[in-house]
Amino acid sequence: MGFLLCVVFFLQTPAQAALPSLEERAARWGSLQYAQSSAYFLSGIPGLPQVVFPASPVASRSHLTFDFSATDFSAADNSISATRFNASQTDFFAVNDSPDDPPASALRVPDTTPASGVLAKPAELPQRDTHIHWNAANRESLLSTGIMHTFNLWTEAGTRDALNGPWFQNWMHSVGELRGWSDSDRFMAPYAGHPIQGSIFGYIFRHNDPRYRDVQWGDGRDYFLSLLRSLGYSAVWHTQWKIGPASEDSIGNVMLHASPGFITLVDTPLLGALTMLGEDALDRYLIMGLENRTANRTLLMLTRCFLNPGRSFANVMAFRKPWERDTRMGIFGPNFTKRQQLLADYRYNGGPKPFEFVRRPNNSSDKDPNHIYPKAAPIELAAYPNFERFAGRNCIGGGGSGAARLSGNWQIVAEVNGCLIMGSSKYTQSGDSLFYGAGPRWTPLATRRWSPFAEVLFGGRKVTYEVDNPALENKLLNAWNDGNGTLPHYPKRSDWSTEVSSNGFSLAAGGGLDVVVTRPFAWRLINIQYTHSWMDGVDNIHPDNGVRITTEAVLRIGTW
């Protein structure tokens, strides 16, 4: 989708685009990082120095220096060095490859003493905006949701038919059908399409989070804090998309017509965050590397969109060009000319790379810089594939868990997982299992890199057995004929499928081993649990005693 949007925008983009903003013109060649009031140097506030580039570009990069008396930046030499200038609690980060700081003469401070001898008090700079732009973020998310609903209504006659009838009653009935793990979609939908959807919501949030809007892969703690915030926002909005008041359940009653499952509620935000991480890594290493080799606008636009589909679609939701970046200069107009000059200098004159990553300074307003973070994570979130075997049947799926630390050795854990029961005698038969539970976890070596644990979870299990009648399904669909046949409404799954389910108390006890990869992440190498359920069997499914094996990715919150 993002790639197609890039093609559409490219066809409508004139050869010479409008002049870029001051922020774009001042943006670092590669990755300009600026902190706090640097935004005000670029915002056009009266009395503050503005960014002015030479009218006729030169063949090499110019060193950016402050000239407060002339209120502009002057070209000092043909290199760029990473330099921080401080004035009235103001930080500006310019890009630099030169090992030397600019000469003292390059920084001139205006004389604030008028002829009368009375000191003039400098104007106070406004505080940098650090508040999340909730209204804009929610509007863009609603627009994205509206586009998805429009596509469904346009292409699915069943979704259009579901608009008839009692809205609230049908919505609640559809939500009530949620069970198990699988939703019967093929691989590409849950493991490719849904993660991109999760990344779209995540990038929408990042674009409207001024504190972390310009983070890049490699920015350390700030990057992972931003990713965690995006994950939470994505989880809320995707849950709304699946079961909320403006969801597939409320507009289309999808779970009344298709196999429901928890898979999208779990994998969309989690895999969406991993998709963002992947897109950010591709942007830094592959796309930026390409921009150090060519200024071809068509190639850069299509590469940015193809390798960053989630970011591209989120840009469009904010009515921006899909290929825009907050961390690098544009690719049209004067920026295109400048790109060509920087590349020529790099290739033929031995100049530095035009685009290089510079780690942004940590956001000191978040925490005390002297704060010591614990080695034992106060909060852990885990996602995992799930394998379980009971009564001679394999059950494959996935799940997630959350743990809060009560003391140095103890955590309280809550867990939900589901799996598709394999080995049915006929392809028309299927079954699934849903487990939910909570309990204590013992972690005697929580501060070590290698940390064994043991846990006991108390909760419940729901097993569902279903038998489909494909012949009856086809007969009903033909009778409905997309609303033009004899059947008045789109047939529900219950019209051609028989379902039997059972609930009961369940227990899971076991343990495993964690290895801390970095402070934010750990890998639960293995978690083996014995499971027992006090419930009646469903057809030939008997989950009385079983063994569950998982390997888990763990996000450790509070250690960084």
Image (cartoon, rainbow, N blue to C red):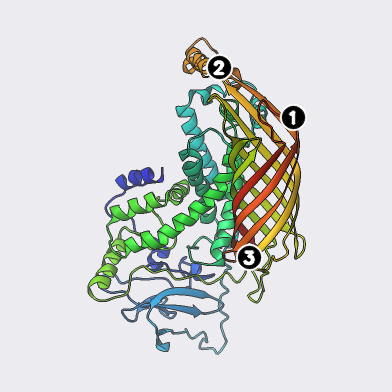
Q: Name the residue tied to disc 3.
A: 450
Q: Position of residue 368 (x, y in %)?
A: 66, 73
Which element type, helix, strand or loop, lies under badge 1? loop
Q: Name the residue tied to disc 1.
A: 536
Q: Earlier in the sequence, mark 2 or mark 3?
A: 3
Which element type, helix, strand or loop, lies under badge 3? strand
Specify the farthest residue to the front: 392
Asked if labels 1 and 2 touch by Cβ distance under 8 angstroms, the answer is: no
Q: Is residue 553 above or below residue 155?
A: below
Identified by mark 3, the residue type is Trp
Q: Is residue 209 above or below residue 176?
A: below
Q: CA distance from mark 3 to mark 1?
A: 40 Å
Q: Quadrant of residue 60?
A: bottom left
Which element type, helix, strand or loop, lies under badge 2? loop
Estimate how packed mark 3 is, as few (under 14), some (14 to 19) or many (20 or more) residues with alpha carbons within 10 Å.
some
Q: Is residue 523 left or right of residue 148?
A: right
Identified by mark 1, the residue type is Asp
Disc 2 versus disc 3: nearer the observer: 3
Q: Residue at x 74, y 29 (%)?
A: 536
